[in-house]
Image (cartoon, rainbow, N blue to C red):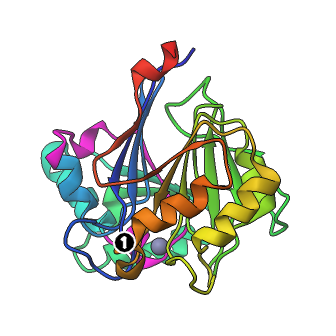
Amino acid sequence: MIGVRVTVLGTGAALATGDRVQTGLLVDMGGSTLLVDCGSGVLHRLAGIGRDPTEIDAVLLSHTHLDHVSDLPGLAKARWMIDGSTTPIIGPPGTAADVAPLFELDGQSDRIDVSCFEIGAEPRDRREIDVPGTEGIDVSVVPTVHSRPGVGYRFEDRFGFSGDTEASANLLGFFDGVDVLVHDCARPPGGEPDNHPTPEALAEALERAAPDIERLYLTHLYPDAAARADEAREVVAEATDATVHVAADTDIVVSERDQTN
Ligand SMILES: [Zn+2]
């Protein structure tokens, strides 16, 4: 079995809270290191766990909203200052055009290497993608249901990340069977799903489409959702056999030790 460790670097959203930076996850898998999303604060969280931008084989983007990309220029500059190397960035169609302006301010355009993978617009389109340095590891994507085109990522049967998305039976079916899923739960209990799920909507879709997930972590918490995170966890836990947690910054959600369990 391929060794995996996943560290959630940031669990917040576009509105700031004092203890949650914006979205970012570090995936160490089979000798490769991938950063999934790079919102504000992620560069500092990376340093806080003793990791270095030059260790990252590729940055995978779920979509290009600012809370998922705003630390990209800082990451690329830090890497260039350390050893002069470029930062490979991979994302869904449109990523190259969307992120290019971020790098103009500091003359950094030659410090990044952006490539995009194709994926259809239909929710049922799923595909494997090629990620440099991850030969032998299956990384696949599925379209999200959000206000901007995006994808969720699945790494073998070990780990999934929803990106920003409404609760979707198709998306959760794509993740069914993974050991650990980190899923958007941005809205508070009793709220209105609006490009992001409430706990109730997530619970309903989980019950329908993903009965076989071992552990679920709720993330992307806006301040009103973060204030009621325990309630949200209880709502979701009612609907699934998975162990449900509220993710916190720097949580290790998949560890090498999990492989022997
Ligand atoms: Zn977001």
Q: Where is residue 127 in the image (x, y as percent from the top left)?
A: 77, 47
Q: Residue at x 41, y 66 (%)?
A: 229
Left/right of residue 91 with respect to residue 106 in the rendered view? right
Q: Is residue 58 magenta?
A: yes
Q: Mark 1 points at which residue?
A: 226
Q: Residue at x 46, y 67 (%)?
A: 231
Mark 1 sits near ligand 1, with its Cβ under 8 Å away: no
Per the image, label 1 sits on a secondary structure element best described as helix
Q: Residue at x 16, y 39 (%)?
A: 50
- Neighbor class of circle 1 (other Cα within 10 Å; few <14, some 14-19, many 20+) is many
Q: Is residue 61 magenta?
A: yes
Q: Is residue 203 visible?
A: yes
Q: Position of residue 145 (x, y in %)?
A: 70, 72
Count of labels shown? 1
Q: In this view, does 175 lie above or below 179?
A: below
Left/right of residue 202 with respect to residue 110 in the rendered view? right
Q: Is residue 15 above or below residue 215?
A: below
Q: Position of residue 160 (x, y in %)?
A: 59, 45
- In the image, 214 versus 124, the foreground residue is 214
Left/right of residue 34 with respect to residue 209 in the rendered view? left
> Which image quadrant is residue 12 in?
bottom left
Q: What range of the chain is rendered magenta? A: 48-70
> Considering the image in quadrants, where does the N terminus appear?
top right
Q: Residue at x 47, y 20 (%)?
A: 3
Q: Position of residue 204 (x, y in %)?
A: 74, 64
Q: Is residue 93 visible?
A: no
| Amino acid found under the numbered disc labelled 1 | Ala
Q: Is residue 38 above or below residue 160?
A: below
> Which image quadrant is residue 2 in?
top right
Q: In this view, does 167 lie above or below 148?
A: above
